[in-house]
Amino acid sequence: MANISDTSLSANLTHKTMTELFDLHCHSNASDGALSPQALMQRAQQQGVTCLALTDHDTINGLAAAEQQAKALNMRFISGIEISVTWENHCLHVVGLNIDPNNQALQLGITGLQSIRVERAQKIAHKLAQKRIPDVYAAVLDAAGSGMITRSHFADYLLKNGHVSTQQEAFDRYLGQGKAAYVSTTWASLPEAVAWITKAGGVAVLAHPLRYKLSTRWMNRLLTAFKSVGGQGIEVITARCSADEIAVVSKYARNFELLASIGSDFHNPANQWVELGRLQALPPNLTPIWQSFKL
Ligand code: AMP
Ligand code: MN
Ligand code: MN
Ligand code: MN
């Protein structure tokens, strides 16, 4: 069931023991999540989460509001981010946890990614126009508001306007790699992303490692590279992961001496399969990443 931890987390907690439920990966409407940072924190509390990290794509803009709401709700909050990375022609996601959002190296780094997102969105819209789906850019810009524009916004548009009948179909026909409106993008390099996170005092975590469909050989290469540039963690538990998947990732965590993280990657309450805090427990022979936090 829950990733309940039964230990006292820090010297400044006077309680001898407390029960924590961690969820260290989720999205607000600062990127492609459906909920405001405030509503996200409220939902997290309703789901029994006691410590939430907000990890929006390439932005820290939701963090201040989430942290304020966490205080009001007496919850723990970890400032986070999910950075888009290009490594050996693969798009990877590196989560930064416990970052200082005021750090200039981090801020400067993600400003570059934000420009890349805008340029890419314009190119995606152009490709869609060539497929007789015009005027999408203005619509997704409006939908994203002050948040990051992501492919999820395009998928929502295509769904709402009847071009596809599911989000998945939007990716399968238009937005996925190699599809009609796919735009190849060079995001941050792996050393850059990890450096921004570590300069901001955070720990870098390889997000959802099995989603990249890498062979064991390539995963070993990736983790070797990740460790060599200062990566410290790996997401062992994600929403809906199987016992076999947990075993596979746990082995990587142990082999590469990586701290184990746990996160739902929650985006939207409409997705009944992924809920905040609905996560399995970490296997006992791993070091939880929250041991590195000063909570
Ligand atoms: P981006 O970072 O702009 O490329 O957008 C990627 C986001 O799109 C991911 O974070 C997911 O939320 C979503 N996404 C990617 N692939 C799929 C898919 N096959 N089906 C539904 N959502 C997806
Ligand atoms: Mn997303
Ligand atoms: Mn991701
Ligand atoms: Mn995510």
Image (cartoon, grey):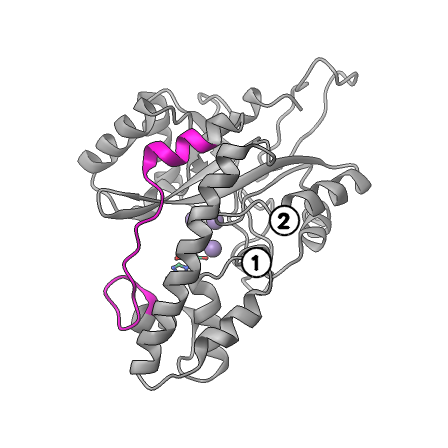
Rendered residue at 57%/58% (across/down) = 147
Across and down, in percent, residue 12 comes to 74, 16
Placement of 184 over or under 77, stated as above or below: below
Real-space Cα distance between discs 1 and 2?
A: 9 Å
Q: Is residue 221 left or right of residue 24?
A: left
Can residue 212 be seen at all in this image of the molecule? yes
Query: Range of the magenta residues?
Result: 175-196
Q: At numbered mark 2, what does the secondary structure look like: helix, strand or loop? A: loop
Placement of 152 over or under 253, stated as above or below: below
Q: Quadrant of the C terminus?
A: top right
Rendered residue at 57%/60% (across/down) = 268
Residue extending farthest to the top is 11
Residue closest to the eye, 149 or 277: 149
- Crowd rating for badge 2 (residues with CA inside 10 Å; few <14, some 14–19, many 20+): many
Tell me which secondary structure the magenta stretch mostly adopts.
loop
Placement of 205 over or under 54, stated as above or below: above
Across and down, in percent, residue 254 comes to 36, 22
Q: Quadrant of the N terminus?
A: top right
**Residue type at mark 1?**
Gly
For disc 2, the marked residue is: 62
For disc 1, the marked residue is: 147
